[in-house]
Image (cartoon, rainbow, N blue to C red):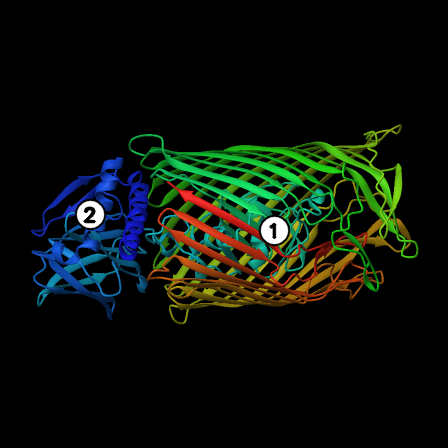
Amino acid sequence: MNNLQRVLWLTGLFSVVLASAAQAETSEVVVVTPAGETATADLVNEAGVAPATTVEEWVSQMAAQETVAANPTEVAQGLTQITGVTLNAAGDRLELALEAEGELATPETAVVGDAIVAEIPNAVLALPEGGEFQQFNPAAGIALVQVTNLPDNRVQVSITGTDGAPTLEPRAIGSGLAFSVAPGIAQGASDDEALQLTVTGEGEDGYNPSTGSTATGGIETPLRDIPQSIQVIPRAVIEDRNAIELGDALETAGGVVSIGGRGTSVFGPGFLIRGFPAEEGIFRDGIETFSLAPLDTNDIERIEILKGPASVLFGQGDPGGVINLVSERPLSEPRYEIAATVGSYSNYRGDVDLTGPLTENAAARYRLNFTYGNFGSFRDFVDGERVMVSPTVAWDIGPDTTLNLYGQYAYNRETIDEGIPFTADGVVDVPRSRFIGEDFGEFSQEQFSIGYRLNHDVNESLELRHALQYLEYAPERYAPLYTFFDETTGDVERLAYFAGGHYQRFFTNVEAIARFNTGSIQHQVLAGVEYRNTLEQPNFQFSADYPAINIFDPVYIGVPYAIEPEFFRDDTINTVGVYVQDQIDILPNLIVLAGLRYDFVDQFRTTQSVGEEREEFDQSDSALSPRLGIVYQPIEPISLYASYTESFEPSFGASRNADGSIFDPETGRQFEVGIKADLTDTLSLTFAAFDIRKQNVETQDPNDPLLSVQTGEVASRGLELNLGGEILPGWNIVAGYTLLDAFVSEDTTDVEGNALANVPDNQFSLWTTYEIQEGSLDGLGFGLGLFYLSDRPGDLDNSFTLPSYFRTDAALFYERDNWRAQLNVENLFDIDYFTSSDEFQFGNPGAPLTVTAKVGVEF
């Protein structure tokens, strides 16, 4: 099999995947004959081809394409060769011309959803540049033009519209054909529903995702139509970097800094967005998720980061933004993938991804992701393991109703490691492998979730959605906790720490999406109501001392202590949210996004120390959170936008002022302006300038260090620049730069004016790959990553500084037929650096040169 054959083989395989995926959605189409008569055809997919339903049919289709590639001259005898394809704009229409060596028959056409498909019989596509032609967004109202070979000596022309199926008028030109294409119009439809077809199946946008749903309440919308900064990390980037944890994947996201990871996962997978923590800002498919363990990426299709306040859609939270994990979906075509990874420091991992139909017509489909990992560390005595199982079933109950059932079980265990102490003069001079905990110290967590999503299209103008999810997790943290570092003696004081308990979270909502026009103005209104219930029953032990350890000459005690919890909490939090949002297309190039949300939060918390009376705390808060944004597109590839958003976060219900009164909710607001530009069809640029203020921040009472006062304000203002996509065929890039000034803008204590902890002034990231496109080295690729963070204060007092670092990563991969092998190198030049620090002045060292090798096979 030569290189051209392999390319055609893979193209055919991906086409079958897409064809089968469309089968469940379209079982009948309208066929227009050359004479103008109409008929119906069953089981025609969105590519206009009956999908392979058996292995024999699939092999037959693949063999037909290989025959065309291997014997173009013999096959072309008696056939008409199409040797050129050109596209030209002609007013409000698009002209598609096929140049041919011989006469082309008048094609039949089929209208399928938002696409019109024409099949030319007795023809073969023989283009100098390759086996197919495709161009995305060639004109207003046209999402994709694609010309491909089909089995049985046919050529397919497929044109997908953004506002419904285009109209197609064929005519003869010499020995070829020309098609006059006019954009289609679908009642109540908008650009948000643009259907884009490709031949790559999952992750079809490569490094340049064109749509997102996080900023618009689950409605797929072109990114350039959203008046807020949103960055999408696609599956292609996650796989090329072999980023197995969420923190690794977010390194290419501008303005996002990881402050968690394996070293401090005892306190959860912490992230800062534009300088603010995202403690309650991690969502999965639009529903809040939570884990004290690092989150795995094996079952994630893409990651969307919405920058700035997001309370209108997601409820209470910090104003920096939210991170939404978009899950992989079941496919209609069977696909089985296994992968194995080995790496430095005894790292081993296996992944399995199984998907396909459960019924003959693919109305029911499944997906099952499984991961097992066992890992060591460059840090002494640190190791761990993880298990994750994620089953999903999608069921098309009827032509207008879909039910998705899903679940996940995750188990994590790892050694608790809090890093290396810092002083005002810098990090203590010890090896970066130095561990000053105890090897019996361990964090473990079992987590379980189950839920469903039900979607029903009442008609073309109204869609109803309902979701329900139950999540529970039981973490345990058992290890000596560092409390103080004596710079003179080198001793680290510790206490016998334990935290355990049980946590439950319940979520349900009902939403309606209405699409209608008022005159020439198009509306897409999202309205919903949601309910959340959170139960927390943690217990803690932290009063007993544990022997100190010397950082320069550690002598490990190795003696576990008894678990005797002494402080207990029992909390119930109920939240009700009502929200409405309208996406308004005032003009084709002028879009307004407006929304309003009302939240009511009721907290009932109790605390009790051993030997003392139980204390009860009841607190209720409510808030209105508005959102307003506008997008203006002076020319089609460029969007200018401005937005204003707000956020709110209730204070912890067991905290009180000195007079016993409750604290007000923390509130935030953001002004943002920006430019989004499609530099080419495959390369996009976003520039944003923003100013965020967070009020009612709790700070230490200067008159009583055991109390807090609510007088603070913190600010974050800056510039962000993000670039992503394909520069040339095979050359992909994702890059970002952030200039950020995050500081305490108001406070009654001496921290006013201080920079926020762990927030760099300058952050830069670049990841780029190149894959050879043809020849004997076809499928061989290379990757290069550059990551820079400037100096960062280690705490809010700015008493010590984490030094800047510039890290280089690299990758080598080779893809052939159904398998792929890759080698990833992190920290190529073995620099010393620290990723983050905590309030006890302990920093988390980054890993030295690390190599991982991964091999995956798809069946």
Label 1: which secondary element: helix
The number of numbered discs placed on residues in the rendered structure image is 2
Image side of residue 33 versus residue 300, left or right: left
Label 1 – label 2 distance at C-alpha = 45 Å
Image side of residue 579 versus residue 393, left or right: right
Residue 551 at what x, y percent from top left?
84, 51
Task: Looking at the picture, tell me which residue is in the foreground, 163 or 825.
Answer: 825
Crowd class of label 2 (few under 14; some 14 to 19; many from 20; radius 10 Å) = some
**Amino acid marked by disc 2:** Ala
Residue 473 higher or lower than 777, as above or below: above
Image quarter of the C terminus: top left
Foreground tag (1 vs 2) = 2
Residue 607 at what x, y percent from top left?
80, 33
Residue 39 higher or lower than 487, as above or below: above
Residue 133 higher or lower than 530, as above or below: below
Crowd class of label 1 (few under 14; some 14 to 19; many from 20; radius 10 Å) = many
Kindly identify which residue carries mark 1.
Answer: 247
Residue 811 at what x, y percent from top left?
51, 58
To which quarter of the image does residue 684 belong? bottom left
Label 2: which secondary element: helix
**Amino acid marked by disc 1:** Gly
Which of the two labelled residues, at mark 1 and mark 2, occupies the earlier sequence position? 2
